Amino acid sequence: MSETTGVKPPSLWRNKAFTLLWSSQALSDLGSSMSQLAMPLLTLAITGSPIQAGIVGTASAAVRLLCQLPAGVVTDRFDRKRLMLVSDAVRLCAYTLLAVLVLLDRVSLAWIMAVTMIATVFHVAHENAQFGAVRNVVPLDRVTEATARNEARGAAVSLVGPPIGGALFGFARALPFFADAVSYLLSFIGVALIRQPMQQERSEPREHPVKELAEGVKFTLSEPFLRAVLLIAPPINLAFNGMIFAMVVILQQQGTQPALIGFVETFIGVGLLVGALIAPRLSQRVPMRRLITGITWLGAALMASAALLTGSILVGIPVALAIMLGPACNAALFGYQAAVTPDRLQGRVMSVIFLLATSLASVSALLGGSLVHWVGGPATVLVFAGIMVIAAVAATFSQGVRGMKPLSELQPAT
């Protein structure tokens, strides 16, 4: 059953503003994914220390968590287009400088840390602004479809970006960072070409930043659907990330060849991409409430079935099938979130959701590795399936999900 009328709407690719926004973020994300692999390789190359390489990655994750809430306030205070342009410009300069330092053999751990921190802060700002802009460049009843297309973009970039970054680093250490800088230049041009407003007119006076942040948190907790998202999204992220890491550890302990483990991870990545590609069609054909509840329960069942296959690389099949369902669920959750949240609060609401979702996901590797060590592979898989059940129960019984209406029947939140 479709939530739209029988008349087929025009393709979103004919929407110039959305296409430019989508393409710009794709280029920005591609640059980020290339440097995410190249940065630890560079750190290892100049220090020879896996610990220092780990410190850089951990520091980046910590900064991302710390700046989520402030970034939400900033996104709602300033013009989104201008904020995205500034974010691209700063990252363009930072990675150009790093590439030049690498080329001149003058790079140090301090420079790597500084560029990583700066890039992380402005990545969060750019990401928040882009999320808030979507509902202003597409009709309200197409927001879920647009979000699904963004999911496809992210899946494709995460699949192709790291190999490109690794290949460029193999040719010359400075190349992936020059390529990253070019991606931000192209993203800057794409955003600059968008003429459609990315936000509604702001007439309300500015309050103290802490008060504005509190307003965003209060609204998130008061809106039934957003409360449901806070119960559904974090365990989904924890379950998926923890399951994938645990699967790698389990296969490694069994003496599986690294090439085969890499094949399984690639297979899962392909599953994510396929799921992202079919997400727009699912979001158009299946009511969002059924989509969210059905996907969470089916995902939990697929994860549980993986416990029977932990003795071979076949364990990747149910995991890939479960991962395939993720983009459609995210599209429904975050598409509806964009519809029920006033435009002036988009950044703050998304920052609260992202903070909880990513903070739980950040401990997934530690939890997965510890569980495999303490209780073994099959039990670990069942634990993560149980975490997915928490999300499924929340989706089934939450008043916010059960009360979801077709986007065509909603009035934009103000």
Image (tube, grey):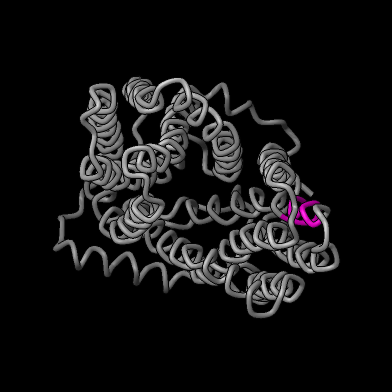
- Quarter residue 392 falls in: bottom right
Residue 319: within the magenta? yes
Residue 143: image x %, image y %?
54, 43
Front residue of 353/384: it is: 384
Residue 156: image x %, image y %?
60, 34
Front residue of 305/309: it is: 309
Residue 136 seen in render: no
Prevailing SS of the magenta stretch: helix
Which of the image's four quarters has the C terminus? Answer: bottom left
Residue 223: image x %, image y %?
46, 69
Q: Is residue 159 toward the left or the right of residue 113 in the image?
A: right
Front residue of 306/253: it is: 253
Q: Which residues are magenta?
A: 315-322
Residue 211 seen in render: yes
Q: Which residue is at a point 45% across and 24% down the rendered structure image?
A: 20
Q: Is residue 339 above or below residue 400?
A: above
Residue 226: image x %, image y %?
49, 66
Front residue of 306/221: it is: 306
Q: Residue furthest front?
A: 48
Q: Which residue is at a point 55% across and 71% down the rendered structure image?
A: 367
Q: Which residue is at a point 31% across and 45% down the rendered structure image?
A: 125
Q: Is residue 240 above or below residue 24?
A: below
Q: Which residue is at a point 30% across and 56% down the rendered structure image?
A: 63
Q: Is residue 36 toward the left or the right of residue 263 in the image?
A: left
Residue 398: within the magenta? no
- Quarter residue 147 falls in: top right
- Quarter residue 301 falls in: bottom right
Q: Residue furthest bottom?
A: 374
**Callout count:** 0
